[in-house]
Image (tube, rainbow, N blue to C red):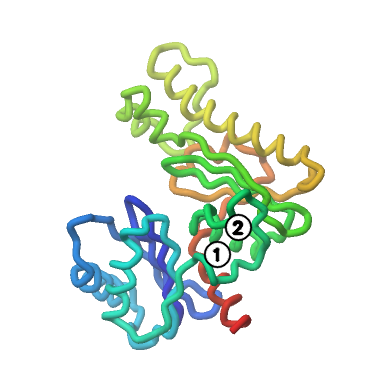
Amino acid sequence: MLLVADAGNTNIHIGCYDGKELLCRFALGVSTERTYDEYAFILRALLREGGCEIGQIDGVMIGSVVPSLTDTLKKAIAKLTDAVILTVGPGVKTGFPIRLDNPAELGADLAANAAGAIEQVGYPVIIADLGTANTVMAIDRDGAYIGGCIMPGVEMSLAALHSAELLPGIPVGESVSALGKNTKDCMRAGVLRGGAMAVCGFIDRYRRNPAVGSDASVVVTGGQAEWLLSYLPSDAKHIPLLTLQGLRAIWQLNQKKH
């Protein structure tokens, strides 16, 4: 059984896989005051509640964008299992060339998203990860990661307007008019419709890039994806667990390499 962990600034998303089958998944909040012993205790309880036997874990793959958390999480997991622990980073194969000015700058979450998207739909592919920040990245016809963009997400945009309480008033899936008739609706239109327009604009621009092409698939993931999905291209494929699936794919690739 493989344990994968996607560690961010706010939450750590955990999944356990038997091959490609997801057995259980959960998330726990990040706290700078929590020791690795406390993380180990919580992880043990959540794994048991999810029906995943700790003794069956034979591999661990961690993707972390918080260096200070990475070591704590590794120590916590090491208290639970003697399985080999790998982290996305230098020395770990991702399965695709990274054509950036500095490939080491590519975040573990984005690398996992790319690996997951390539496994799920192939390439060329454009990946939109919609969370606190929105990222749109492109994998070209040769299967290489060639770059992308980062912009404020729904939460960041609402915080900038000092009106973060407005979004909860919109049920997921409810249509928001692009032509607001009052202050609240104008803000919602700007944040939701405007955010979606920006993402769509980058998708269109990347599809015009000859290295990517108009036939590139579009994959959407992230915690805020449901807010914007209805305003994105109709051919976009929503894969909520893309990052975890990508971590699993990277683990499997490195088992083949070694």
Residue 165 lies left or right of residue 133; in this view the side is: left
Are discs 2 and 1 less than 8 Å apart at CB?
yes
Location of residue 29 in the rendering, given as x and y in whole percent from the top left corner: 28, 56
Residue 90 vs 232, above or below: the answer is below
Left or right of residue 66: residue 209: right
Quarter of the view holding residue 82:
bottom left
* Amino acid residing under circle 1: Gly
Few, some or many C-alpha atoms within 10 Å of disc 2 (few <14, some 14-19, many ≥20)?
many
Residue shown at the point (50%, 54%) measured from the top left: 107
Specify which label sits upstream in the sequence, 2 or 1: 2
Q: Which residue is mark 2?
A: 114
**Residue at 71% over, 35% down:** 205
Res 93 label: none
Element at badge 2?
helix
Residue 180 spot, x, y in % from top left: 48, 15
Say which element carries label 1.
Answer: helix
Residue found farthest to the top: 181
- Res 135 → quadrant: top right
Q: What separation in Å lies between label 2 and label 1 (alpha carbons)?
A: 7 Å
